[in-house]
Image (cartoon, helix red, strand yellow):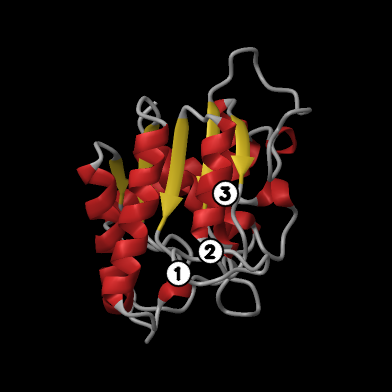
Amino acid sequence: MLARRPLAAAAAAMTAALLALVALSGCAVASAGPLEDAVVPAGAERVAVIGDSIESGLGLDPDESWPALVAASRGWRLSNLSVPGAGFVAQGSDGGDFSAQVATAIASRPQLVLIGASDNDLGTDPATVSAAVEKAVDQIRSALPHTRIVGFNALTGQAGDDELAPLDAAVKKAVEADGGTWLDLGQPYRGLAGLVQDDGEHPTLPGQQAIAAAVEAQLPD
């Protein structure tokens, strides 16, 4: 299903403006994985990202993923734990689902955790996904009571909004129930020429920049 969610004109204009800002940011500073050796400001906010191939920047350099772009812009100390193929239930290329990323995130004691729905969980019973989502978010909140939790919708180049709605709703409900923040990023790159790789699913660098711009526009400081 390839239905598209039309973006409001104002949001599109904001995204276009922010794309230029993100493109000019110091992208080389950030990279996927813990930035223990990167040049980041003293006292930089520790951030962990739990996600799939979109967040990992599959097909690109790690520092071209949207988490790395936002980290460079905001001066984060980033641990991008995202794994291609992974979801709350789906097993990724490392054989683990999001629970493995959650455990690693908790161990790193971040001040902010970003966790997104994933289209890799499509085809799994929604109740099973919802239970896994609730467990993951509750684990983060229980272990890190003072950490900000931010959830976001599944990002995709192919799946339709109706397909993704139950997955997004499960993450939104769990995150907000634990006092977190929900970001509805829309689909900043889906179906847009030059923003999608040849596989039809993963964003190009401009596609990753479009996602980063959407995150920057909504994520509180």
The disc labelled 3 sits on which kind of residue?
Trp
In this view, the residue farthest toward the bottom is 1
- For marks 3 and 1, give the one nearer the viewer: 1
Which of the labelled discs sits on residue 1, or is there none? Answer: none
Q: How far is the residue under mark 3 from the one under mark 1? A: 23 Å
Query: What residue sits right under mark 2 in the picture?
Result: 97
Q: Which residue carries the number 1 mark?
A: 89
Residue 10 locus on image (x, y percent): 28, 49
| In the image, farthest residue toward the right | 37
**Residue 29 point in image, percent of width and height:** 72, 32
Determine the image quadrant of residue 116.
Answer: bottom left
Q: Is residue 36 left or right of residue 217?
A: right
Residue 115 percent across, percent down from the top left: 43, 49
Q: Give the residue pinned by disc 3.
A: 66
Asked which secondary structure carries label 1, the reply is: loop
- Secondary structure, mark 3, is helix
Q: Is residue 88 left or right of residue 171?
A: right
Mark 3 vs 1, N-terminal side: 3
Distance of label 1 from label 2 (alpha carbons): 6 Å
At label 2, which amino acid type do we have? Asp
- Depicted 42 relative to depicted 206: above or below: above
Residue at 37%, 87% (x, y): give it.
1
- Do the CB atoms of the residues marked 1 and 2 lie less than 8 Å apart? yes
Q: Nearer the viewer, mark 2 or mark 3?
A: 2
Percent x, y for residue 130?
29, 65
